[in-house]
Structures are given as C-alpha cells and as structure tokens.
Amino acid sequence: MALFTLIVGSLSAQTVKGTVKDASGEPIIGATVLEKGTKNAVVTDIDGNFSIKLSSGNELQFSYIGMKPQTV
C-alpha cells in the first residue's frame, strides 16, 4: 500500500488529507485510516482520498483486507 499525504493545521490538532494507492498507483477504495491508539478512523472514498483530524504527535495506521497494515 502506498500513500501520499498533505498535512495542514495547528500544533495541537491537524487535519491530514491524502490518497491511499496500491503498488501500481491505483486508488484503494474502502481502506481504513486510523489514528493509532484511538477510535478515530475514516474510510477512503472512491478515489482513495481521506481526511482525518489528528492529535499532534499521533501516528496513522492504514489497513485494507488482503494487505499488510502500515503505520506512519
């Protein structure tokens, strides 16, 4: 699973937007994007895009059926 993100926001909380793609560059529809250590999660749309509010310093975990989860 590949990933491209753009981070925008303040020091206390950030809105992270990006696109989740597979190794061939195709968008992954329905991938889960989770703020690690919380229940805050979103699912990618038909174009693989997501937007999530993230607490400062927290990591994101990306998962999809049949693929190894990744944390950034």
Image: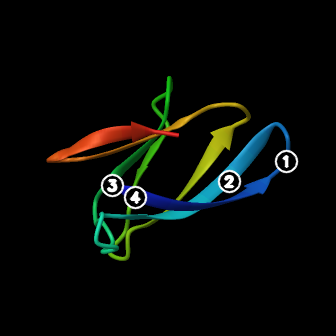
Q: Which is nearer the N-term, disc 4 or disc 1? A: 4
In the rendered structure, are the residues bearing label 3 and label 4 in contact, judged by CB atoms less than 8 Å apart?
yes
Residue where numbered disc 4 is placed: 2
- Residue at 28 percent across and 72 percent down: it is 24
Label 2 secondary element? strand
Question: What is the spatial separation of the Cα atoms under label 4 and label 1, in whole angstroms?
Answer: 26 Å
Q: Which residue is mark 1?
A: 10
* Marks 2 and 3 close (CB-CB < 8 Å): no
The Cα atoms of the two marked residues, 3 and 4, are separated by 4 Å
Residue placed at 85% from the left, 47% from the top? 10
Mark drawn on residue 15: 2
Asked if residue 26 is positioned above or below residue 64 in the image, the reply reads below
| Residue 71 % position (x, y) | 46, 37
Does dot 4 land on a helix, a strand or a loop? strand
Residue 5 % position (x, y): 58, 60
Q: Kindly check if marks 1 and 3 are in contact, taking CB atoms under 8 A apart as contact.
A: no
Q: Is residue 71 above or below residue 21?
A: above
63 over 25 or under it: above or below: above
- Which residue is identified by label 3? 1
Residue plotted at (32% across, 39% down): 69
